[in-house]
Structures are given as structure tokens and as C-alpha cells.
Image (cartoon, rainbow, N blue to C red):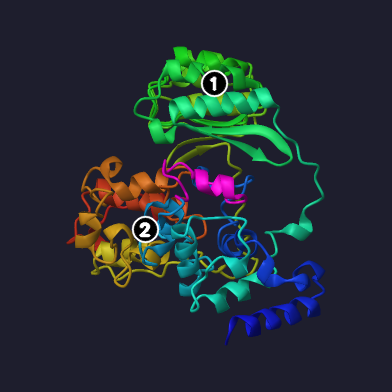
Amino acid sequence: MNHSRLASIALLTAALTGDSLRAAAPDEQPIFASVINKIFESKCLSCHTAEKPKGGLVMTTLESITKGGESGKAGIVPGNAAESWVYGVMALPLDHDDHKPPSNKPQHTEKELALLKWWIDAGANAATPIKDAGIPADLMPAAMELAVLKVEAPAAAARPLITPKDLDQATKDSIAAITGALGVTILQLSQSDTGLMFTAVNVADKFDDAALAQLAPLATHLSDVNLGRTKVTDAGLATLAAATNLQRLRLENTAITDAGLDQLKGLEKLEYLNLFNTAVTDAGLEKLSSLKGLRRVYAWETKATKEGAEKLHAANPNVIINLGWDAEIGRPAITPVAASEPAPATPAGEPAATAAADPEASFFTARIAPVLERTCYSCHGAEKKKGGFQAHTLELLVKGGKDSGAGIVPGKPDESSIIKRLALPKDNDESMPPEDKPQPTEKEVALLKWWITAGADAALKVKDAQVPAELN
């Protein structure tokens, strides 16, 4: 089918759908907006909008796509698809850990990927009309199909009309200066919100108090700040005392102590605080009592105790404090179903009632493997080993993956990567299972940790396992 024939079909399609702009001349439309961006709109915007910038990457404009996200690599490098992060992750095998979109999301076609590669290698020109772009003949049908495609923005019908809000020039200049000097990522939250999302994940190993102090001109604009794994100390948090619009703050794996939390006392809009693996104690939690907007605190692997968490919850009944795999203070208790009522059906992805196990059976086979099968095998089973990790045999479970370390360390649950991943906040990219997969119950996680603590013995039989009564 030749070019003119394709253009005629496109014209007819556009006319039938009432799209007068496209009916004028589909092949005269700019290639980025009408072809390349259609790939991104249909495959990427569920995770990469200003409202949901997963990995710090926003894909709503060519500028933001080119800039890239927390990977530290340019999303698009004009003239070099091989060096373009966006193309690179889309070209990975579907079962690769870093493949995008995730395997459970709609996938691009081979032709769409080839179009993207061709366009980047050709210079990533946005304005060139389709007819003048020099698209290879074998890719032209796919290009024209995209040109007449109408892509609905996610949940567009449910969104009210908004009046875009732009940052003032002084703020834009400050952002440009700071990102250029420090290599950090700063993004406007959305068209309707001049709040800023900040992350230092790309330069965490060298981002310190002095670097944080450079954010002072932006303090009142900061809404979401990620300082996880940086070199920031208590003294550095003085910069955030002026961040009166801050809603989310990540301080996990830093040197922050109770003293640093004094700087947060005036942040009335703070809703989320991650203190994982810091030296914070009960005294630090008490300093958060005045923050009535606080809704979630992660304090696992800190020096805080259940008593300290309960005291904070008493002062703020709306806050939930996570102290680890089996301790979450403030979450409403689940009311048991009365014995006289019929048992509800088990929802899809939820664990079914456990039948009595054969006393002579292996404890791993009877009690542990079913949990792993329901929550892990879809990505880490016999047929699929994301990250090089498989969990369908005890030997492979202990071995772990190529980057995660030992999945199970007998006798040491806190050193077992499977327990570490389960305990991470769900907004952490390394948390497992992913949010859209079946999740283990608190009781199942507790059982898994008990089994590891007991030695993760392959020979242990059901009849010999001294399982705590509350886990049976």
C-alpha cells in the first residue's frame, strides 16, 4: 500500500470520526504530536504524569520526556536511541526487571518500538510533518495508523476543567540553577498545583547539608521531598523548617536522629514521614505529636518502640505508625464475621482457608510454599525469574537473585531479602510484591518470619514445628 493510499484512508477515517483537524491533512501533522507521542500516551501515562511521576519521570511533554527521571539518564538523546533511557527500557525483554511498561500493562508493538528508535536516531525532531520526515516505507503504515488514533487521557472524563498554574520566573530560575549545580530532580506536581516534587536519589552519596541548604529559595514550594540515603544530618533539616507546604518527606537510611525532628514541628501540612533505618527513638516520635495532619509514619528498624508509637497515636488518632512486618499501630482492627453468618467468598488474589496439613509433610511444602505460590510465583516461579530470582524451590529461595542477595538467611529474618522487601513501604520501588499483585496477609508474613527465625529447615515436619498458636 503506497503513501497516498494510506493518506486517503487516514483522511476518510478522520472524517468519519468527526475530527476536522485531522481530516484536513493527517500526513501534514507534526510527527511527534501525531505519531510518537501517541505511543507514550497509550502506554506510559498511567504511571508517568505530573500527578503520578513514577521514578521522577513525567511523560506529558517532549521536554519532560527528554529530561528523564530519577535514573539520572536523559529520556531521549536526539540522534542516539541506544543512549536514550526511554527507548532502552522499552526495548528490553518483557521478562526483564527493568522492562517498561511493566508486563501487566498494555505493551507497545514491534512497529511502534521501531518507529520510536527511527525517530530518535533521526534527531527526534518534533515539528517535522509526517510526509517530510523520511519515515521508512515498512514503518509508514504504523505511523499513519497512529496519526488517526484517538487516545483518551487516563480518567479524562472524570477530571474537572482546570486552570493551569505556572511557576513565577524567579522560581523557574532557581530550579534551573539548583538542578544544574546539584544534579537533582525538581518537578512541578501538576498543571493545577505549583507545589514541587524534589528527589536527590541520583546523587544521594554526595548530597549533604550544604546541598540541601541550596533549596532555601524553593522552601515554600516544596510539597514532596525525598532525601532517602543521602548524607543529610539533623543540622541540615533546618532548611525544611520553612517548607510550610510540605506534605511528604522521606528520610529513610539517613543519619537523622530525634534532634532533627525538632525542625519538623511547624510543618502542619505534613502527611507522610519515612524514618526507616534511622536512629529515631520514642522521644523523636513524641515530637511529632503536634502534627495533626500526619497520617503515616514508617519507623521500622529505628529505636522507636510499640509504646512510643501508641503514645503518638493517642495524641493523633489519625496517624498509622509502621514498626515493621508485624507491628502497625493505629490501623483499625478487622471485625471478625459472626459464626452464624455464612462465610464470604474468597476474593480473587486473596488466600483461601488453609486445610489441615499432613503432620508428616514438610513444613515448607505445606505452609510456606503456598504463600509464595500465591504472591511470588507469577514473577519468580519456574517459568519466570525476574531479577534472576526464583522462589519455587527452597534451594533457589535461599540463593536469592542477582542483585538482591540471599532470599533467605536461616535464623536471620532481618538479613533475608524477601523479608526486607516485604517490609518496605508500598511506594518504594523495591517493595515486593508490587501493589497490583496479590499481597501476603500480616499473618502469612509473620509465619514466614517465624519459620526463617526457626532455621528455615527443609527437613522440618508439620508435626514437629512449634508454631505460635496465633499463627496457626
Question: Residue 4 is drawn in which quadrant?
Answer: bottom right
Circle 1 sits on which residue?
A: 215
Compared across the picture, whether 15 is left or right of 229 comes to right
Q: Position of residue 6 (x, y in %)?
A: 63, 82
Q: Residue at x 23, y 69 (%)?
A: 360
Q: How many marks?
A: 2
Q: Main secondary structure of the magenta part?
A: loop
Report the front residue among 235 and 472: 235
Decide: is 170 above or below 64. Answer: above
Circle 2 sits on which residue?
A: 97
Decide: is 83 above or below 201. Answer: below
Q: Position of residue 352 (x, y in %)?
A: 48, 68
In 3D space, how far apart are the residues under numbered discs 1 and 2 (Cα atoms)?
34 Å
Report the front residue among 99 and 347: 99
Compared across the picture, whether 360 is left or right of 82 comes to left
Compared across the picture, whether 347 is left or right of 20 comes to left
Q: Which residues are magenta?
A: 57-77
Decide: is 173 above or below 411. Answer: above
Q: Quadrant of the C terminus?
A: bottom left
Q: Position of residue 188 (x, y in %)?
A: 63, 36
Tell me which numbered mark, 1 or 2, is placed earlier along the sequence: 2
Q: Residue at x 60, y 57 (%)?
A: 46
Between tags 1 and 2, which lies in front?
1
